[in-house]
Image (cartoon, grey):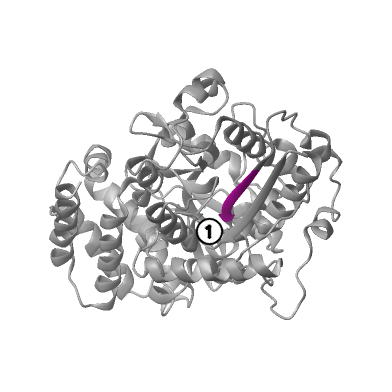
Amino acid sequence: MKKKVVSLTMVGLLAVGLLAGCGNSSSSSDTGESDAAAAAEEEQATAEEAGEASPDTEGDEEAETSEEVASSGDTSAVEAIADVGYEGDPVELTFWSLSTRQEGLEALTDIFNQANDNITVTVSCYDTDGIKDACKTAAQSGSMPSMWFNWGGSLGQYYVDNGVTYDLTSYASENDWDNTFNSGVLSLCTLSDQVCGYPTSYNVIGIYYRTDIFDQYGIEVPTTLEEFEDACATLKENGITPISTAGLYGWHVMRLVEQFIEYYAGADEHDQLQALEASWDTDSIVEALTLYQEFCDNGYFPDGFITANPDDTYMAFATGACAMDIQGQWYDAALSSNGADLSVVGWFPFPNGTDRMSAFAEMVQFNADLTDDELEAAMLYTQFMNSPEAADLYPDDYNLPLPTLDAEMPDASTNPNVESMLDYSAEHGTFTITDQAFPSEVADVLFDCQDAICEGSMTPEEAAPQIQDAIESYKSSN
């Protein structure tokens, strides 16, 4: 069978493979969802007819073929495991994933296709928020791919609620996933009492900071909120923007706002707020949003941050224009791959009073309509793509370490903060990142309120009941 990998990129690849969230990793507004997805489908059809990959970020340079990319490193280890021994009927599968991981995705898929005569996988790539729009529209039109990248929590819950993702509960039990994946990531991929995806990463969020800038101005690592505010004030007084953040899509700013909520609400109330079991029209929310407003008014964020792209926050941090960025453990690899000096990069947990860190999971979900042969082939492909051999060949395309119990920590020379971040989270606990705890209908309102508070068109006292109204509206319609 002829092997072909078709790659669609909704936007040009950015200079660094950062997740947004929640991503990476995480969440965005669904405003304009239908138009964005329709444009994506039209562009994909054009790309498939031409049989070409979309251009890279340079625009005027010819994109490398998957064969060229694959030959750029020692592929012997992945080639040795690429033949997965599939003996079922010939199947053709489609996989939608992130453009920030396009290089490794294309190359590894090509190796897999070449090694397995009865399986052909075609991949399409989207930016972080584009894949959310495209998948939702596909779910509504009954045109989901065979498998797709997604996040845990409410972002994955949508596909469970609408019956389009494969229930892997029995499969996970038969294949002993409890003794394969760490319990934290497996729980975040278990929604409505069903395992709804293959876990691919477990991530925790902390404050990355420039140790050289802190040293220059005599700033100690803050252990209380008051010390954190003092550090921001000192930096601002000396011409350094304290925190690199960006408001486009809302989720990057949300990472800081949710820490303010953790501080004022405490762990128990915050968990209830995220579960929509406690009212958001309450003093702790007003206090958290008031502190966020003060940070905006004090100039603790870059000028014009509300409309800036969160995938670009690393640039101000790497150049020293900003002293801090709120990111997950993948930030080590992102900075390293772009030539940043990691000897002046450290991290600390946000001093929220509970010591808990924000956490989220990533996974691959599978179409509920897959046949037995298609599911087997799709799972074999997913296991190959998330093998240690694949991650070793393209480490920048993975949020390391892999979420398995036997996973090794990444090289400390290029990932110096990863192990300590994960160890800290294991010791002190985590809470689910807000845009995976919230349904998108509520997260969108929170993001809009963040923008309005920053712009001065809404007060925290007005925002809190507006968020609660969105929660009540969501509950009444579900």
Q: Position of residue 100 (x, y in %)?
A: 61, 60
Dot 1 falls on a residue whose secondary structure is strand
Q: Position of residue 337 (x, y in %)?
A: 70, 59
**Residue occupying the point 32% across, 44% down:** 353
User: Mark 1 = which residue?
Assistant: 209
Is residue 136 visible to the viewer in this orientation of the structure?
A: yes
**Residue occupying the point 86% across, 41% down:** 76
Closer to us: 326 or 348: 326
The residue segment tinted magenta is: 92-97
Q: Position of residue 126 (x, y in %)?
A: 55, 61
**Residue occupying the point 86% across, 47% down:** 74
The answer to if 95 sits in the magenta stretch is yes
- Is the residue 133 above or below the residue 416 in the image? below
Closer to us: 111 or 189: 111
Is residue 244 visible to the viewer in this orientation of the structure?
A: no
Q: Position of residue 286 (x, y in %)?
A: 17, 59
The answer to if 211 sits in the magenta stretch is no
- The main secondary structure of the magenta stretch is strand
Q: Quadrant of residue 287?
A: bottom left
User: Which amino acid is tagged 1?
Assistant: Tyr
Horizontal arrangement in the rendering, residue 283 relative to residue 67 (left or right): left
- Is the residue 197 above or below the residue 447 in the image? above
Horizontal arrangement in the rendering, residue 269 relative to residue 233 (left or right): left
